[in-house]
Image (spheres, rainbow, N blue to C red):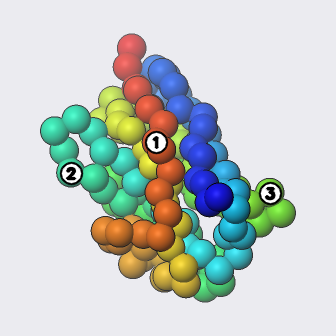
Amino acid sequence: QVHLVESGGGLVQPGGSLRLSCAASGFTLDYYAIGWFRQAPGKEREGVSCIYSNEGKTYYTESVKGRFTITRDNAKNTVYLQMNSLKPEDTAVYYCAANYITPASSMCDIVAPNYWGQGTQVTVSS
């Protein structure tokens, strides 16, 4: 069976850091673009950061540039989102998604990817 499993969410104070992981099973990420999306209560889902290693490019939404870094470890079939200098407005459920052969910038606009994870809660609060 195919699964994407997120982990690493939690409660952190403003200015703190978290690293989210998205582990894939049942398929290899080699030819897939991976995106991190988030949805806060009452807000639309937004693409936060995406990566497609075959094109060697990453994409970040403007509000997280310079604070978040997306990386992937193909050997572990896992994608990470390092989040630094977290702000209360980063509070949301974070989801990872995978879609076959998709440019990173397009991945972050995708509506119906091949696979979704179940989400992990990130809360930034003092």
Residue 53: quadrant of the picture: bottom right
Residue 87: quadrant of the picture: top left
Give the residue at the far right of this rendering. 75
x and y, in percent, of residue 13 in the image:
46, 20
Comparing 27 with 81, the one in front is 27
7, above or below 96, in the image: above
Q: Is residue 54 left or right of residue 17?
A: right
SS assignment at label 2: loop
- The Cα–Cα distance between marks 1 and 3, rounded to whole angstroms, is 19 Å
- The Cα–Cα distance between marks 1 and 2, rounded to whole angstroms, is 15 Å
- Tell me the number on the disc at residue 44: 2
- Tell me the number on the disc at residue 119: 1
Residue 2 visible in the snapshot: yes
9, above or below 45, in the image: above
Mark with earlier residue (1, 3): 3
- The Cα–Cα distance between marks 2 and 3, rounded to whole angstroms, is 31 Å
SS assignment at label 3: loop
x and y, in percent, of residue 124 in the image:
40, 26
- Three-letter amino acid code of the residue under disc 3: Lys
Mark with earlier residue (2, 3): 2
Quarter of the image that includes the C terminus: top left
Near mark 3 (Cα within 10 A), the count class, few <14, some 14-19 or many ≥20, is: few
Q: Are marks 1 and 3 in contact (CB under 8 Å)?
A: no
Comparing 14 with 20, the one in front is 20
Q: How many marks?
A: 3
Near mark 2 (Cα within 10 A), the count class, few <14, some 14-19 or many ≥20, is: few
- Residue bearing the label numbered 3: 76
Quarter of the image that includes the N terminus: bottom right
